[in-house]
């Protein structure tokens, strides 16, 4: 018996250890030295990459991203842009027209593993590498690379000499190791959508003409030699002199930099542990940037309070001249805008520091957990910075409804690169992703969602959370079972449509019949307003929730029996006569994304719903 118990204990311990270790993460440590030629728009670099295999697998190959190769005629990005039905107007056929001096490229001069030369092949934007020796589990190997590259004319996110006159926006600029996780390698070709990177540390030295001001991911290590607003001492540089900018960025999954000869550089404190840096051209609505800066500071304070503390000591807002895009500890944004637009793009990209920069979700697979959650939080922050009587999330809900009506909707499980249209990708990722959280608040209650989102941030920061990781956090916080919500709202394009079918007087009481005409079930708040001014919420949980929310949104709440999801109708009685009732409304909070709210009210209210523009692909 003792032997059997010991065997059982060992088996249980093995299973527990296995469960704890199934979410290992690879680790990288980059050292890069880059010499930049601003006349030719080219650079040469060396890269030492220490790669730690924390997986239980033996690796025989590795893969690198060579993003700049996308900016060549005939690339997959070029062809995709020219063949999709609704191309990004900033791209269209521009890549196909680039001359040899305008294209982007990354060329590998040499690559060694632990000092041994390697065989490799460039396949578009991916470098396929056959290893000289296998990388065993828990082993650490060093890759030494020499490379050279050319900066393309700016088309999207990265490049030179854009419409706003920014000299260099250097995103996706270096050979970057692809991510290998519990699902295997993620060596996706670059066609302009989202990214996924390995957590690690960066030590980067950039040598270029001293006339440039450089903004970058990480902390500048030699400000006393640089000047340009990085140190209190102003440093004079000779014409033609080159400077080496040394940045260190710990615990990030990417590194970006930008350079311009006309950057102004402001530093504003959020608190004793966080500085915000602002880089913008001196001829670019400087007064608007000055007005934006304190609002950006308020954004960080709101996010720290509501979603969790930003863990780095610095964040940079950089005029990049092309939309807005999030990077580690920094963002590149278009700079010449009015105050509201400038604040909006700054807020959105800054919030990505939570929902991408710190919670490193695979945004190619789960763009809605990145763009959508960022949009949800952006709506909250903007409503505090620019108070309005309108519901903060209303625009996202309306955008989602319009996508459904268009017939173009695809499930949120669709890979970002594989959506049939830019519109479907954009609204799914930004708007439906925001609706997902707003509706989750409706299901579990405002307090539980807020505490759950903080717990999610604190438990999964510096990791790669997936949808189930968030689900388990919210289930633990709320005590509810939520499989059904993830399965239907994320995994399908099923829609929600409830209605009040019948309201009749019955012996001093009022009988109500509700109907579900949409495919997706939901719990319901059915709020009755009486003519004496009082209100009562008749709350109907779903049976498969295995519980109910506890939300004190209404003065009185009456808990009704569960609604089994297969039943198309549900009846209940109100203990007051029909003559006492002024109105009955399904979900007056409008957090539920019912695609046809017109049938949610008794007596019925006819109204024309305003249309909202889709959120543009960034």
Image (cartoon, rainbow, N blue to C red):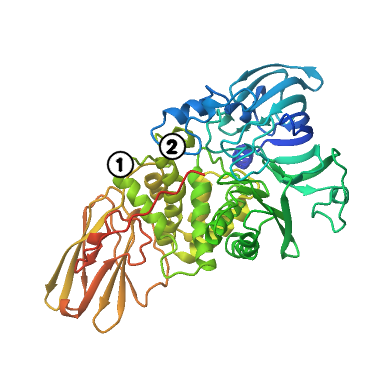
Q: Residue at x 40, y 42 (%)?
A: 423
Q: Residue at x 66, y 57 (%)?
A: 310
Percent of width and height locating residue 125: 60, 25
Q: Nearer the viewer, residue 228 or 230?
A: 228
Q: Nearer the viewer, residue 372 or 97?
A: 97
In this figure, what is the number of numbered marks? 2
Q: Nearer the viewer, residue 558 or 92?
A: 92
Mark 2, other Cα within 10 Å: few <14 / some 14–19 / many ≥20:
many
Which part of the image, by quadrant, shows the N terminus?
top right
Q: Does any portion of residue 575 appear in the rendered image?
A: no
Does 408 sit above or below residue 84? below
> Which residue is label 2 attached to?
414
Q: Residue at x 60, y 52 (%)?
A: 335
Q: Residue at x 48, y 55 (%)?
A: 475
Q: Is residue 137 left or right of residue 364?
A: right
Could you give the CA–CA distance between mark 2 and mark 1, rounded to whole angstroms? 16 Å
Percent of width and height locating residue 95: 54, 29
Does 238 sit above or below residue 313? above
Q: Which element carries disc 1, helix, strand or loop?
A: loop
Q: Is residue 577 left or right of residue 265?
A: left
> Which residue is label 1 attached to?
407
């Amino acid at each position: 018996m003792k032997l059997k118990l010991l065997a059982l204990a060992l088996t249980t311990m093995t299973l527990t250890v296995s469960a704890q270790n199934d979410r290992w993460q690879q680790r990288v440590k980059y050292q890069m030295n880059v010499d930049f030629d601003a006349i030719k728009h080219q650079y040469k670099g060396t890269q030492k990459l220490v790669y730690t295999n924390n997986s239980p697998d033996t690796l025989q190959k590795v893969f690198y991203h060579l993003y700049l190769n996308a900016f060549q005629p005939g690339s997959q990005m070029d062809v995709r842009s020219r063949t999709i039905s609704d191309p990004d107007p900033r791209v269209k056929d521009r890549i196909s027209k680039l001359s040899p001096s305008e294209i982007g490229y990354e060329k590998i001069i040499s690559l060694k593993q632990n000092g041994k030369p390697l065989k490799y092949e460039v396949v578009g934007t991916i470098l396929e590498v056959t290893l000289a020796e296998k990388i065993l589990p828990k082993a650490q190997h060093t890759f030494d690379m020499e490379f050279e590259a050319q900066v393309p004319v700016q088309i999207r996110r990265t490049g030179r000499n854009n419409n706003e006159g920014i000299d260099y926006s250097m995103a996706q600029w270096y050979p970057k190791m692809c991510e290998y996780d519990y699902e295997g390698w993620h060596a996706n070709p670059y066609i302009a959508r989202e990214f996924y990177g390995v957590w690690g540390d960066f030590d980067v030295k950039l040598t270029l003409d001293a006339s440039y001001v450089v903004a970058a991911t990480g902390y500048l290590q030699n400000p006393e030699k640089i000047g340009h607003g990085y140190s209190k001492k102003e440093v004079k540089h000779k014409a033609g002199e080159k400077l080496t900018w040394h940045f260190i960025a710990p615990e990030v999954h990417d590194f970006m930099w930008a350079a311009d000869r006309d950057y102004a550089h402001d530093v504003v404190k959020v608190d004793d542990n966080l500085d915000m840096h602002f880089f913008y051209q001196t001829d670019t609505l400087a007064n608007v940037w000055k007005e934006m800066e304190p609002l950006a500071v308020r954004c960080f304070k709101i996010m720290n309070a509501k979603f969790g503390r930003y863990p780095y000591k610095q964040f940079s807002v950089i005029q990049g001249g092309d939309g807005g895009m999030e990077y580690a500890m920094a963002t590149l944004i278009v700079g010449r805008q009015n105050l509201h637009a400038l604040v909006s793009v700054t807020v959105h990209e800054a919030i990505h520091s939570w929902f991408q920069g710190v919670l490193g979700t695979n945004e190619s697979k789960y763009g809605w957990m990145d763009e959508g959650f960022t949009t949800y939080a952006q709506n909250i922050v903007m409503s505090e910075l620019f108070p309005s009587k309108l519901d903060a999330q209303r625009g996202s809900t309306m955008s989602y409804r319009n996508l459904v009506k268009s017939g173009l909707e695809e499930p949120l499980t669709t890979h970002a690169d594989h959506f049939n249209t830019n519109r479907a990708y954009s609204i799914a990722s930004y708007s439906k992703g925001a609706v997902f959280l707003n509706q989750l608040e409706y299901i579990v209650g405002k307090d539980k969602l807020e505490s759950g989102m903080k717990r999610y941030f604190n438990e999964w920061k510096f990791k790669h959370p997936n949808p189930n990781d968030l689900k388990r956090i919210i289930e633990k916080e709320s005590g509810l079972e939520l499989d059904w919500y993830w399965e239907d709202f994320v995994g399908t394009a099923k829609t929600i449509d409830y209605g009040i079918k019948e309201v009749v007087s019955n012996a001093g009481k009022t009988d109500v019949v509700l109907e579900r005409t949409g495919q997706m079930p939901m719990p319901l708040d059915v709020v009755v307003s009486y003519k004496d001014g009082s209100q009562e919420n008749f709350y109907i949980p779903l049976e498969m929730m295995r519980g109910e929310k506890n939300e004190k949104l209404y003065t009185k709440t009456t808990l009704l029996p569960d609604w089994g999801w297969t039943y198309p109708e549900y009846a209940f009685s109100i203990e007051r006569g029909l003559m006492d009732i002024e109105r009955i409304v399904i979900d007056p909070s409008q957090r539920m994304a019912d695609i046809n709210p017109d049938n949610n009210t008794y007596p019925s209210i006819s109204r024309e719903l305003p249309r909202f523009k889709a959120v543009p692909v960034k």
